Each structure stands twice: as C-alpha cells, then as structure tokens.
C-alpha cells in the first residue's frame, strides 16, 4: 500500500492540540470507513467533538479550494 501525501491545508498538529486527540489517527480511521461513534469510543471522546473536528477540516478544505480557484 502506497503512502498518501498529506494535504498542506490540514494542520494536524494544531488540530491535535485543540481537540486533545491524535488528529492523524482520527483522519486515518475516517478514511478506513469507521463511524464517528466507533472512533469516539476508540479515543475516549464524544461524537460531538469529532463532528466539530470534521467541520473544521471541511472548512479548511473549502477555503483551500476557493484560494486555488482564484489563482487560476
């Protein structure tokens, strides 16, 4: 399995500090298809906190796409 390059718009260290979770492992679990409830149980957090984290990642992705479209 080849290693995927991480997008530059995700600051995983800042997310890890903000949510007191290992953001890299959470993102990997989402990519593997695990549910928010399953991830929350694995990491000892609430599904609401995971939802906030996911929304923040989605907003960062949207902003990155808008910046990319403005430059082209």
Image: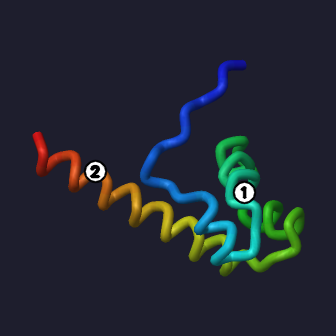
Query: Picture coordinates of residue 40 (x, y %)?
Result: 80, 69
**For the point 66% across and 20% down, which residue is it?**
2
What secondary structure is found at the residue carrying circle 2? helix
* Residue under the image location 66 percent in, 52 percent down: 27
- Name the residue: 56% across, 65% down: 54
The reply to whether the C-beta atoms of the residues labelled 2 and 1 are less than 8 Å apart is: no
**Drawn side of residue 4 relative to residue 39, left or right:** left
Residue 23 is situated, as x and y percent measured from the top left of the image, at 68, 60
- 70 vs 64, left or right, is left
C-alpha gap between disc 2 and disc 1: 22 Å
Crowd band around label 2 with a 10 angstrom C-alpha radius: few (<14), some (14–19), many (20+): few
Residue 26 disc label: 1
- In the picture, measured across the screen, residue 65 lies left or right of residue 69, that is right
The image quadrant of residue 3 is top right
Q: Secondary structure at mark 1?
A: helix
Total marks in image: 2
Q: Quadrant of the N terminus?
A: top right
Mark 2 or 1, nearer chain start: 1
Colouring style? rainbow
Is residue 50 toward the left or the right of residue 63 in the image?
right
Give percent across and percent down for residue 72. Answer: 11, 40
Residue 9 disc label: none
What residue do we see at 54% from left, 40% from top?
6
Residue 65's mark?
2
**As displayed, is residue 44 above or below residue 33?**
below
Quadrant of the image occupied by residue 67:
bottom left
In terms of depth relative to the viewer, which is nearer, 22 or 26? 22
Q: Residues within 10 Å of mark 1 (few under 14, many from 20)?
A: many
Q: Residue furthest top?
A: 1
């Amino acid at each position: 399995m080849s290693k995927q390059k991480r997008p530059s718009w995700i600051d995983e260290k800042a997310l890890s500090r903000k949510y007191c979770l290992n953001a890299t492992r959470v993102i990997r679990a989402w990519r593997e298809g695990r549910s928010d409830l399953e991830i929350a149980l694995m990491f000892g957090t609430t599904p609401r906190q995971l939802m906030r984290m996911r929304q923040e990642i989605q907003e960062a992705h949207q902003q990155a796409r808008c910046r990319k479209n403005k430059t082209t």
